[in-house]
Image (spheres, grey):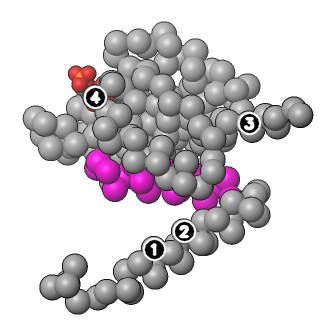
Amino acid sequence: MKCPIVPVKISIVMGSKNDWKTMKFAAEILIKLGISFDAEIISAHRTPDKLFSFAEQAIINGYKVIIAGAGGAAHLPGMLASKTIVPVLGVPMQSTALNGIDSLYSIVQMPSGIPVGTLAIGKSGAINAALFAAQILALHDSHLSVRLNQLRKQQTEDLLIETDPRKL
Ligand code: RP5
């Protein structure tokens, strides 16, 4: 029996292997939702040529959303966005020197004409980037839309099981 080939629709990229400890939270959400994805280290400064070829081939590779995590002088999401019209969601890493403010400002302050959807610093941003990407895909995927609604419902129910913080 032939296995159906599931097209990969999302790419998670990050500037350094050290960013994976944050970006893995995005990966976990995509796995939970049954969305296949690629994950790759691409540095705007250390591997700029790779960044360009990745962005140029993003549409041909079938990516519908790129989630890009970067820290410090975090140019990866913006430079990717400058080379492709695939939507780019930027996740600022919680850097040690400036606690992620540097990453946030680097990613969020894009010049008009080249948008990057910027999420929160760190883990919350990684999780929400994955959910945001899933919601974009769900516009054209009713099965995914059902799974997303189930996830929301579960999240609500989990919180309502015990609302007395002293018992948690
Ligand atoms: C950025 O520089 C990466 O996204 C990373 O967050 C930051 C520091 O990189 P490492 O020195 O930890 O590899 O490109």
Q: Where is residue 67 in the image (x, y as percent from the top left)?
A: 49, 40
Residue farthest to the front? 1
The type of residue carrying mark 3 is: Pro
Task: Check disc 1 and report its element: helix, strand or loop.
Answer: helix
**Is residue 118 at least partly visible in the picture?**
no
Span colored in magenta: 121-139
- Residue at the spot of label 1: 155
Kindly check if marks 4 and 3 are in contact, taking CB atoms under 8 A apart as contact: no
Q: Where is residue 18 in the image (x, y as percent from the top left)?
A: 28, 28
State how many labels appear: 4
Residue farthest to the bottom? 164
As drawn, the label of residue 18 is 4
Crowd band around label 3 with a 10 angstrom C-alpha radius: few (<14), some (14–19), many (20+): few
The type of residue carrying mark 1 is: Gln
- Residue at the spot of label 3: 7
Task: Check disc 4 and report its element: helix, strand or loop.
Answer: helix
Q: In this view, does 84 lie to the left or right of 102?
A: right
Screen quadrant of the C terminus: bottom left
The quadrant of the picture showing ligand 1 is top left
Q: Earlier in the sequence, mark 4 or mark 2?
A: 4
Q: Which residue is drawn at 13% across and 36% down?
A: 96
Please say if 73 is above or below 161.
above
Q: Does ligand 1 reach within 8 Å of label 4's beta carbon?
A: yes
Please say if 56 is above or below 93.
above
- Residue at the spot of label 2: 151
Q: How far apart are marks 4 and 2 (CA)?
A: 29 Å
Kindly check if marks 1 and 4 are in contact, taking CB atoms under 8 A apart as contact: no
Q: Earlier in the sequence, mark 3 or mark 2?
A: 3
